[in-house]
Image: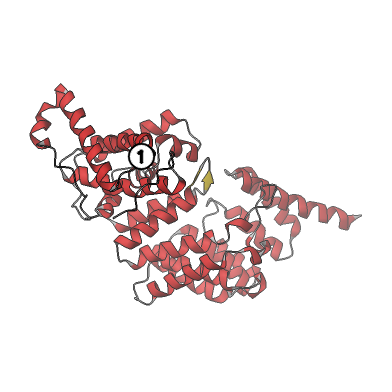
Amino acid sequence: MAAPINGSGAISVGDAALLRSLTPSVLTVLVRRGADFAAAEDAVQEALVEALRVWPGDPPHDPKGWLVTVAWRKFVDTTRSDTARRRREDRVGEEPEPGPAATVDDTLQLYFLCAHPSLTSSSAVALTLRAVGGLTTRQIAQAYLVPEATMAQRISRAKRTVSGMRLDRPGDVGTVLRVLYLVFNEGYSGDIDLAAEAIRLTRQLAAALDHPEVAGLLALMLLHHARRATRTAPDGSLVSLAEQDRSRWDTRLIAEGVEILQAALARDRLGEFQAQAAVAALHADARTAAETDWVQIVEWYDELVRLTDSPVVRLNRAVAVGEADGPRAGLAALAELDNSLPRYTAVAAYLHERDGDPVTAAHLYAEAARAATNLAERDHLIRCAARLNTAQHDRSL
């Protein structure tokens, strides 16, 4: 049973986190009782608003049971007041007696529903954050820097798409993991830290599903997140991996990520997220950039190529080859790829710089900056080009 909510007169940070953690299980209780997903999700959101109003002065002993009872009542009221949907009354039935909520957790099925293949990636991410993460539409809109009305329409469309679909159908774990990874890669904006939220949701999924790729994704997130504080300078500019202050990396997260990864790899069911986490672990293990085991990293990229045959993986592999076997070898690996790939020109610039050709490198950095869609990345590439051009000018004097 969850701990009682505090009675201090305001919802605390911990209480707000409890509300968010209970959201998916409360939603699945309503769906199991026969509520349509869209209507059930609306009822749960109304119950959460009611909790914010009532709990500070009258904290419940069983928070989940309270939310289930209030959400179900709101669903029944809405259904009965909608004359166009009176046929649903037969499914509503009598309201269950209030009491302790069942301990069955259907959160796993909710993950699969929110990551349904009929949804676009952006819709699946938004619906997962709303239904599983318990975030409000406003919070999700702020995190993605879009108007609240736009996000509301996106979520409404997603809810209509999955309404009527049963929760007991087998789901695709890979799709769920890709949705969570998309959330993680959004990082931070607004008042919601999406990277931290993705880690929280992936921990939740790992607790519900014994799967090595879920563990691999969690390890990958933890290992990347451990370096977060060093990825940008005080002025917001990007800091390359080689230049990051490794003494500021979070060793606790690194240790946890490595432990989770080792346990997953020991099951001998290798997947792409485990392989990516292995690359991240090798970076985390190096005390300095010079000590990085690039040979092993190339080997892990070879495994990733075998698993995914992804052009982006091949692009990253070319960088690793350039570090392990020299920039000429990296350029040769790069030449085998389509030059229209995102970041292709930036990789070519880096390898040419490593090969001692600053003129070509500066030109390519500038070209890559013009094509960059991310402002921080564009500024970083411009600075790289300016650095090389300045060095060339100084040498010519």
Q: Which residue is pictured at 33% across the width and 62% down the height?
A: 207
Figure quadrant of the N terminus: bottom left
Of residue 230 and residue 21, the one placed in the foreground of this image is: 21
Residue at 66% in and 56% down: 239
Q: State the residue in front, 361 or 119.
A: 119
For this orientation, the residue located farthest to the right is: 397
Residue 46 is left or right of residue 388, and the answer is: left
Question: How would you rate the neighbour count of disc 1 (Cα within 10 Å): few for under 14, some for 14-19, many for 20 or more?
Answer: many
Helix, strand or loop at mark 1: loop
Q: Is residue 16 above or below residue 295?
A: above
In this rendering, position of residue 366 left or right of residue 211:
right
The quadrant of the image that shows the C terminus is: bottom right
- Front residue of 284/2: it is 2
Amino acid residing under circle 1 = Trp
Q: Place residue 209 in its image quadrant.
A: bottom left
Q: Position of residue 52 (x, y in %)?
A: 38, 37
Above/below status of 265 relative to 19: below
Q: Is residue 133 visible?
A: no
Q: Residue at x 62, y 54 (%)?
A: 346
Which of the colour schemes (rainbow, by chain, secondary structure, one colour) is used? secondary structure
Count of numbered circles on the image: 1
Which x, y percent locates residue 55?
A: 36, 39
Note whether 293 is above or below 382 in the view shown. below
Q: Residue furthest left?
A: 90
Q: Residue furthest top?
A: 83
On the rendered structure, is 138 left or right of 86?
A: right
Q: Which is nearer the eye, 275 or 162?
A: 162
Q: Position of residue 50 (x, y in %)?
A: 33, 34
- Percent position of residue 40, x then y: 24, 38
- Judging by the rendered image, the residue that carries numbered circle 1 is 55
Any part of residue 24 in sight: yes
